[in-house]
Image (cartoon, grey):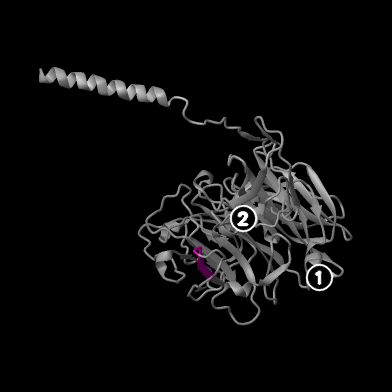
């Protein structure tokens, strides 16, 4: 009986609840949500705008059942490198100069209906770029002094950039050459490329890569600058992004990449005068070897190779003297002059061109280990290659080949077959003044961790006595050159070039 009563009470209680719910239906003053619709901010996946150019966006706004809403607006953006939000505007349409640092941003537009509190948001990717962020930088000699021009990868030419950026001043002679560095940690400041102007007997100066204005002496990047004029001969990073190296007055300066700007803590210790070439090493797959080195240099003073790794505590080292497991040659006893060094088409092998006292030329290949096995291979280069009079070199990482200029001709040396061939002769009256290959300097897993990779273009500067020209070639699958695919003229004598890849 008791159980029946409890069951009856339960049924009554549930019925009351259901009835109460039914009575609540319609008690709320529900209003339809009149959604705000914003048209896309761009017709493409992202917007590109040049630094200092005006960014204009006029989106259309509609709202269901509302013809004239009471709206407020907010435009802002934030960097892909997680920098603070940058507020841009509170107007419906955006019209603002792109003044933020170069790089990628997420651009956000928010519209709010003040009557209902309803908001709608649109966003797109925004890239602020420089007209000079990629292309070929040219150092020209003119009657007034040195000048800088820039040829964009789209073929657009920008002239007289140095004088325009430096209050009409020209670069004082001697002009020297351009040096550059891709500095991975600089991406935090949207400034991964550094460019320097270096000449014998003068202090090397930094140029702003976006304007080519002088940005200060290179000595600002050195913890302990050497005495006398400071000349930068080469500068390079390490594939993993941990180290940077520079050759200054014949000595190796070392720094870590923990700083947002490159900074060199000091000079590597040792009795040496280093050749003006830097090889930072990798196995090509991100792995390490027993006794692996991170830097290889050549000591012109003592005729030997030297190595460095982070475990050698600030010292440049000679190679092991244990010859029980020898290589192809003794890296401690080369006794020749280094005229060029470059990365090869095989990760883990590095090319060095040498000349002996009689003028004979040799190629040496080094492996990134500290034992005698570092001496991987060498060969005497045939005299028919005419390399003993060469003055300009450029090494390919796509093919086992090195381009060089001898007798005002471009020749191509194949170090696998130890042969050379003529690939280009300029028109009569034109003198070759510089030679460069297009390169990529971003070392990642997808690029095989190679710090320098050539990318299929060759640039040749010529001068006919009154006009400098820049000739662009497509490199064939065999390394041969046809006629230039493009020629740019109207320059002074082009003394040096630096290739800026698109980051």
Q: Residue at x 81, y 71 (%)?
A: 169
Please tell me which residue lies in front, 153 or 248.
Answer: 153
Q: Is residue 267 left or right of residue 204?
A: left
Q: Where residue 69 appears, x then y in whole percent?
A: 68, 39
Residue 362 in view, yes or no? yes
Q: Where residue 410 appears, x then y in whole percent?
A: 73, 51
Neighbour tally class for label 1: few under 14, some 14-19, many 20 plus, Cα within 10 Å = few
Please tell me which residue lies in front, 58 or 156.
Answer: 58
Q: Residue at x 63, y 35 (%)?
A: 36
- Which quadrant is the N terminus positioned in? top left
Tags 1 and 2 touching, CB below 8 Å:
no
Q: CA distance from mark 1 to mark 2?
A: 32 Å
Residue 167 tag number? 1
Q: Is residue 159 above or below residue 457?
A: below
Please identify, in this view, whether the residue under mark 1 or under mark 2 is nearer the observer: 2
Helix or strand or loop: what does disc 1 sit on?
loop
Neighbour tally class for label 2: few under 14, some 14-19, many 20 plus, Cα within 10 Å = some
Does the magenta segment cover residue 446?
no
Q: Residue at x 58, y 69 (%)?
A: 247
The residue lying furthest to the bottom in this view is 227
Main SS of residues in magenta: strand
Residue 86 tag number? 2
Give the magenta part as a residue range: 253-258
Lower position in the chain sequence, tag 1 or tag 2: 2
Q: Residue at x 70, y 71 (%)?
A: 199
Q: Is residue 143 left or right of residue 137?
A: right
Q: Where residue 225 appears, x then y in whole percent?
A: 58, 78
Q: Is residue 288 left or right of residue 494?
A: left
Q: Is residue 181 above or below residue 166?
A: above
Q: Where residue 58 appears, x then y in whole percent?
A: 73, 42
The residue lying furthest to the left in this view is 1
Residue 183 in view, yes or no? no
């Amino acid at each position: 009986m008791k159980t029946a009563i409890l069951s009856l009470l339960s049924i009554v209680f549930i019925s009351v609840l259901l009835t109460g719910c039914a009575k609540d239906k319609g008690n709320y003053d529900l209003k339809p949500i009149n959604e705000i619709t914003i048209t896309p901010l761009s017709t493409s996946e992202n917007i590109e705008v040049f630094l200092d150019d005006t960014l204009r966006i006029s989106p259309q706004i509609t709202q269901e059942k509302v013809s004239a809403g009471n709206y407020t607006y907010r435009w802002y953006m934030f960097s892909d490198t997680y920098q603070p939000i940058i507020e841009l505007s509170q107007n419906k349409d955006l019209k603002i100069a792109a003044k933020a640092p170069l790089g990628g941003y997420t651009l956000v537009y928010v519209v709010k209906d003040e009557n209902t509190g309803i908001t709608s948001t649109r966003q797109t990717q925004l890239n602020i770029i420089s007209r000079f962020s990629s292309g070929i930088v040219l150092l020209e000699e003119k009657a007034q002094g040195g000048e800088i021009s820039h040829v964009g990868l789209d073929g657009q030419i920008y002239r007289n950039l140095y004088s325009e950026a430096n209050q009409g001043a020209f670069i004082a002679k001697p002009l020297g050459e351009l040096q550059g560095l891709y500095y991975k940690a600089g991406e935090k400041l949207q400034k991964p490329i550094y460019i320097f102007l270096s000449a014998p007997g003068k202090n090397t100066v930094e140029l702003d890569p976006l304007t080519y204005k002088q940005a200060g002496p290179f000595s600002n990047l050195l913890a302990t600058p050497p005495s006398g004029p400071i000349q930068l001969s080469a500068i390079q990073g390490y594939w993993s992004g941990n180290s940077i190296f520079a050759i200054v007055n014949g000595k190796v300066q070392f720094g870590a990449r923990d700083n947002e700007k490159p900074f060199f803590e000091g000079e590597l210790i040792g009795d040496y005068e280093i050749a003006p070439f830097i090889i930072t090493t990798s196995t090509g797959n991100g792995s390490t070897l027993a006794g692996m080195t991170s830097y290889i240099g050549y000591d012109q003073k003592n005729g030997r190779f030297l190595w460095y790794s982070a475990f050698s505590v600030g010292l440049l080292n000679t190679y092991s003297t244990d010859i029980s497991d020898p290589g192809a040659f003794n890296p401690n006893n080369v006794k020749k002059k280094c005229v060029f060094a470059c990365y090869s088409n095989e990760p883990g092998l590095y090319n060095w061109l040498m000349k002996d006292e009689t003028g004979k030329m040799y190629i040496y290949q080094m492996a990134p280990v500290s034992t005698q096995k570092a001496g991987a291979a060498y060969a005497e280069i045939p005299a028919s290659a005419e390399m003993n009079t060469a003055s300009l070199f450029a090494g390919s990482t796509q093919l086992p080949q090195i381009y060089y200029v001898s007798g005002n001709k471009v020749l191509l040396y194949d170090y696998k077959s130890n042969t050379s061939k003529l690939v280009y002769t300029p028109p009569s009256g034109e003198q070759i003044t510089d030679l460069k290959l297009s390169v990529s300097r971003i070392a990642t897993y997808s690029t095989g961790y190679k710090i320098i990779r050539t990318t299929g273009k060759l640039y040749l500067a010529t001068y006919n006595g009154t006009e400098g020209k820049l000739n662009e070639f497509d490199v064939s699958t065999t390394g041969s050159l046809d006629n230039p695919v493009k020629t740019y003229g109207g320059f002074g004598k082009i003394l040096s070039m630096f290739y800026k890849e698109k980051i």
